[in-house]
Image (cartoon, rainbow, N blue to C red):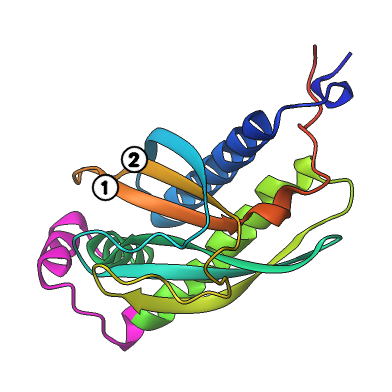
Amino acid sequence: MSSRDETPTPAALESAALAAIVQQVAADLSLICDRPFEVEHVSTERAAHKRAAGGTVHISFRASFEGPTGHGEGCVMLPLPEAVSLAAFQLGQDDETVRGRRASCEVDRPTKDTLLELCHLVCGSIDAALRPFHAERVQVTSGGCQGVRAGQRPGFGAADGDDLLIGTVRARLGAFESFELVLQLPASLLDGAHLPRRAA
C-alpha cells in the first residue's frame, strides 16, 4: 500500500505540499548560490487576505499557476537583504562583499537582472515540487519581481476573500542570521491533489 491510496486530510495535504515546495526552493537556491540555504521551521495556515510584508522592504517573486483547476497567482516573499544576498552570491561575490551589500541594500542593474533570474528559478522549483502531487501537471511560470514596502501587501492576482495557503518559513542563508520567508499560494492549487506515492 502507498500513501496515495489513502485520502489525506486537507491540512495534511497542505502541510506536505508547502514543505515540499520550501525544501525544493531551498535546495535549488543553495545549489545556484553555492551557500547553505537552511530551512529551520515551516508553519502552514489558510487566510482570506494576502500577508503584508513585515518590518522592512521585501522582494516578492511572483508566480502564475495554470492547471486542471484553472489559473491562479501567488508569490514567495523575502526581506530585501536576503534577496540582494542571493543575487550577489549568484553573481560570484564573496561573503565580505555580500555583507556590505546587505548593509546598503543597493539594487543596481545587474542585481535587478539577477533577481529576475532567481524568480524564474524559484518558479521552476515550485513547479518541480508540485508534480508528485498532481496526476495532471500544474505549470508554474514567473510573474516577475516586485518591491514591497513594510506593511504593504504584495501585488499578485488575488482579491480579499480569496482562499490562500500561507507558508511561514524560518530560514538561514549561509552565515547570516535567520529570516522569515513567506509563501502565498492559491488554495485551489491543491484541488484534486494527492499525497505523493512512497513505500509503505
- SS type, badge 1: strand
The residue lying at 31 percent from left, 72 percent from top is: 152
Q: In this view, does 163 lie to the left or right of 105?
A: right
Depth order, front residue of 200/57: 57
**Which residue, as the protein is rendered here, is positioned at the far front?**
161
Is residue 15 positioned above or below 35 on the image?
above
The residue lying at 11 percent from left, 73 percent from top is: 104
Q: Earlier in the sequence, mark 1 or mark 2?
A: 2
Q: Is residue 83 magenta?
A: no
Q: Is residue 113 left or right of residue 24?
A: left
Q: Position of residue 43 (x, y in %)?
A: 44, 36
Disc 1 marks which amino acid? Phe
Q: Label 1 to label 2, Cα distance in Å?
A: 6 Å
Disc 2 marks which amino acid? Arg
Classify the position of the N terminus by image quarter. Answer: top right
**In this picture, which residue range is highlighted in magenta?**
93-111
The residue to which callout 1 is attached is 179
Q: What main secondary structure does the magenta stretch of the protein show?
A: helix
Is residue 82 positioned above or below 152 on the image?
above
- SS type, badge 2: strand
Q: Where is residue 11 in the image (x, y as percent from the top left)?
A: 62, 32
